[in-house]
Amino acid sequence: MAGAGLLMLLDDIATLLDDVALMTKTAAGKSTAILDDVATQTKVAVQKTAGVLGDDLALNAEQVTGVKANRELPVVWAVAKGSLWNKAILVPAALLISAFAPWLITPLLMVGGAFLCFEGVEKIMDLFHKEKKHDVKTVLADSAEAQKAGVAPSSVRAAHEKQMDPLEYEKQKVKGAVRTDFILSAEIMAIALGTVSTKPIWEQAAVLIAVAIGITVFVYGLVAGIVRMDDVGSWLMAKKSAAAQAFGRGMIAFTPWLMRGLSIVGTAAMFMVGGSLLVHGIGPIEHWIKDSIEPLGGVAAALGPTLVHVVVGAIIGAIVVLCMEAWHKLRGH
């Protein structure tokens, strides 16, 4: 009897282990399927944010333009850390808004769009306020002060025009880049959230976190590569190969043009992104685009909406600038 009882116990244990193995296999299969779903949703979300990513890249590369060469990477790293903090705030906020107040998403994005357009108008206005020529004495003085402060000569000139300390101006430039990143990151998170709005909350969180980390690494890694192109060119010029030396000289010659181009594209992106956020919340204009411009097809359908976004963004940005100027005058500044 004792032997039979022992055999029955062993049989029960074996059956239990089979059940555990089966359940483990099933759970592993479900986990794999869930991970695959998260990966797929993340891929879709990143694809949908591709347009904003291009603007994000241009804007962030433009923000580093004019920074002293040995401070380019520290500045990029400072903005990247700020971007991660932005996303650490935005991911929980997006999940809370999605769960309790989805109607808030559009108004908040419109506020962000108005801010981007406001900054775009200010950048254009700064072009008209800058001195076109600097005499040799001023240039030498700016260079000496820049060397002492550890900033670029362009930062010294811009700081003098704004009556600021050059080092403080550079710090403000980084803060401005982080603020701009916040708006762009908010739009990216909103787009990503839209792709998983029907999924469980934990899956939404997983996709948003994956998108936030992946996009930050991609954008700021690429920005770091762009701003150090001149160093790569110098490294190639030190090689024995004539082809490598020629390529290195080409990179060094091309870098200033690339940075100027990114500065222009970055400013335009403020109106394109900001205008699209504003138009999305202005029903009559959005419906007009869909009913009158998109049906035209071809180039008109491709470029028409973007042109409308830029025009609307420029108008609203100018209105915000005028309101801010009036506010400062009322306060006596």
Image (cartoon, rainbow, N blue to C red):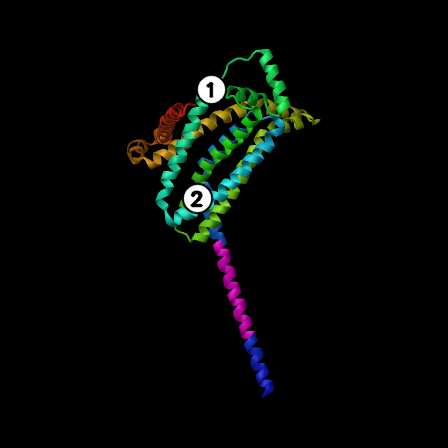
Closer to us: 152 or 12? 152
- Residue 240 x/y as whole percent: 71, 26
Up/down of 52 relative to 9, above or below: above
The residue beneath circle 1 is: 127
Q: Look at the numbered discs 2 and 1 and tell me whether their residues touch, using CB distance below 8 Å.
A: no
Where is the C terminus found, in terms of image quarters?
A: top left
Tell me the element at label 1.
Answer: helix
Q: Quadrant of residue 319?
A: top left
Tell me the amino acid under the disc marked 1. Leu
Where is the N terminus found, in terms of image quarters?
A: bottom right
The crowd level at tag 2 (other Cα within 10 Å; few <14, some 14-19, many 20+) is many
Of all residues shown, which one is farthest toward the front? 332
* Dominant secondary-structure state across the stretch colored magenta: helix
Q: Is residue 284 left or right of residue 4?
A: left
Counting residues from the start of the chain, the first of labels 2 and 1 encountered is: 1
Magenta-colored span:
14-34
Tell me the amino acid under the disc marked 2. Ala
